[in-house]
Amino acid sequence: MIGTWVSIIPPVLAIVMVLLTRRVLLSLGTGIISGALIVAAFSPTGTIVELWESITVSFWDWGDKAINADNINIMIFILLLGVITAFVSLSGGSRAFAEWAIQHIKTKRGAKLLTVALGIAIFVDDYFNSLAVGQISRPITDRHKISRAKLAYFIDSTSAPVCVVSPISSWGAYLIGLLGIMFTGAAVSYSPLSAFVLMAPMNFYVVSTLALVFFFAWTNIDFFTMKKHEDRAEHKGQLYDPDKEIPGQLKEDFPTHTHGKVRDLIGPIVTLIVVTLVMMIITGYRASVEAGIAVSIWSIFENTDVPFALVIGGSIGTILAVVLYLSQLKVNEVASVSLMKKAFISGIQAMLPAVLILIFAWGLTDLIDKLDTGQYLSEVVLKANIPVAFLPAIMFVLAGLMAFSTGTSWGSFGILLPIAGKIMLDASPEMLLPALAAVLAGAVFGDHCSPISDTTILSSTGAGCNHIDHVATQLPYALISAAIAAIGYIVLGITGSVWFGLLAVIIVLVALFSIWTIRARGEVVAAEQVS
């Protein structure tokens, strides 16, 4: 059953249950149980062993028999971020920053565009992006009555899509290294770095996604479930559904006071960002030297330890947040040491739901890896004997399905890029880069939509949005971007021209924006006539 059609049952079951029941842990748990049963061939003892290993894989790497430091560091960082959030609220930093933002960012459009700009500017890592942008933007978007679902969409749509085309990022370094392995001994006329740069404009999903993000940030147009969230935020002042669990949302009501300053929020967050970047460079440099690799900006980002850097940055940011609050003890009549204890507990409690979701998602991903789900999906294409002209579009769809089912774009990169490279080098070498770009685009699309993706989980956490609400509101927009990208890849395959494919994407985008704008104006006129 491993490596067959049966291997897709656990991820499909989990995803369908998430969408139907909107209970994430129950759905992921069901997927884990079904995956364990299949891996163990329905042996009771074997199933129990697989369940234990899948739940504990977040802490212990059973393959290497070692502590899973990366996952542990990510969980620690999330908890630290909750503590920083609590102390920023306790010190009055969130309130002060929001008041400052209202004076300087006076429009809803400005708040949305600032969030998008920050999402693009912080491009070194998607985890880092998702959580940092959320912490900075949330006070501003809250004041301008922008729903948390919209904030989560902006964060998610400017993290991985930007990282996958940026050579100076953890993603870029990983992909350049993977291309280097693929190109070894192959008859290609470009270096891995130049190939990666050339592939950027061929990533039609990124082009369409960023175009949609800017359109929805500039206008007040929204569709589907997102419109309901935006209308509720605008007319009722409810930024999220109060009846649903919100990761990162503090349950403790701290005393209000006027001693908070903008620095109480900016200081810890900027410190977190700067220290994390510095630690990424330091760890990447050390790893390059230890491996005997020539040190360069590419080797640094390829070998950097992002989770460890996040923990160090989060720890220093937490210490500064505590110090800034301690400085208020003499002047703030409501400040006390007992409140500090409550802040620590409240911050950790706020982030526990996100940590639990990650643990279950990582467990399911581990079982999916054992089931060879990705390998099965890739073999389907190899056996299909598809015409070369349609391969970029097929690779895009397959990568999307694989990443959506497995919850990981990087895993899809590792499986599909070599397969796409082999097919194209044998069948149509001139289409090599477009096919590889289509794999990158599809993997980001699938990861972008998947409710079991860690980046999707972290985006909802950073925004303080219910996870399923984020998935439900983002999915239609992501599907629109994917449909536009697929059209681009079909045109590219038929014409053999990247620029014709890109032109097709631009034409469809312009047509959609024009239709949506005209329709929105018509609705406004109709509403005015009724009133």
Image: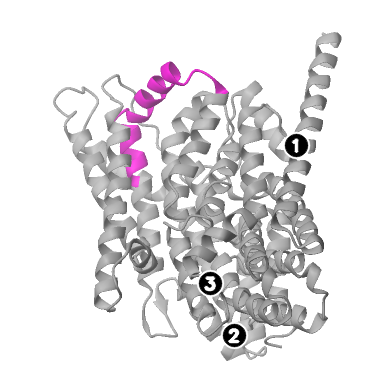
The residue carrying mark 2 is: 47
The residue carrying mark 1 is: 510
Q: Is residue 106 visible?
A: yes
For residue 423, above or below residue 132: below
Using a 10 Å C-alpha cutoff, classify the residue at mark 2 as few (fewer than 14 neighbours), some (14 to 19) or many (20 or more): many
User: Which residue occupies the foreground of this view, 101 or 252?
Assistant: 101
Please tell me which residue is depicted at 54% across the width and 46% down the height of the picture.
158
Disc on res. 363 = 3
For badge 2, the amino acid type reads Thr
User: Which residue occupies the foreground of this view, 18 or 486?
Assistant: 486
Q: Secondary structure at mark 3?
A: helix
Q: In the rendered view, does 245 fall on the left or right side of 518?
A: left
Q: Residue 137: x and y, percent?
A: 46, 35
Q: Earlier in the sequence, mark 3 or mark 1?
A: 3
For badge 3, the amino acid type reads Gly
Residue numbers of the magenta segment: 83-108
User: Which residue occupies the foreground of this view, 128 or 146?
Assistant: 128
Using a 10 Å C-alpha cutoff, classify the residue at mark 3 as few (fewer than 14 neighbours), some (14 to 19) or many (20 or more): many
Please tell me which residue is depicted at 42% across the width and 19% down the height of the picture.
104
Q: How many discs mark residues in the rendered view?
A: 3
Q: Residue 246: x and y, percent?
A: 53, 44
Q: In the rendered view, does 90 fall on the left or right side of 359?
A: left
Q: In the rendered view, does 431 fall on the left or right side of 518?
A: left
Q: CA distance from mark 3 to mark 1?
A: 42 Å
Q: Earlier in the sequence, mark 2 or mark 1?
A: 2
Please tell me which residue is depicted at 34% across the width and 65% down the height of the picture.
304
For badge 1, the amino acid type reads Val
For residue 257, above or below residue 66: above
Q: Residue 19: x and y, percent?
A: 71, 55
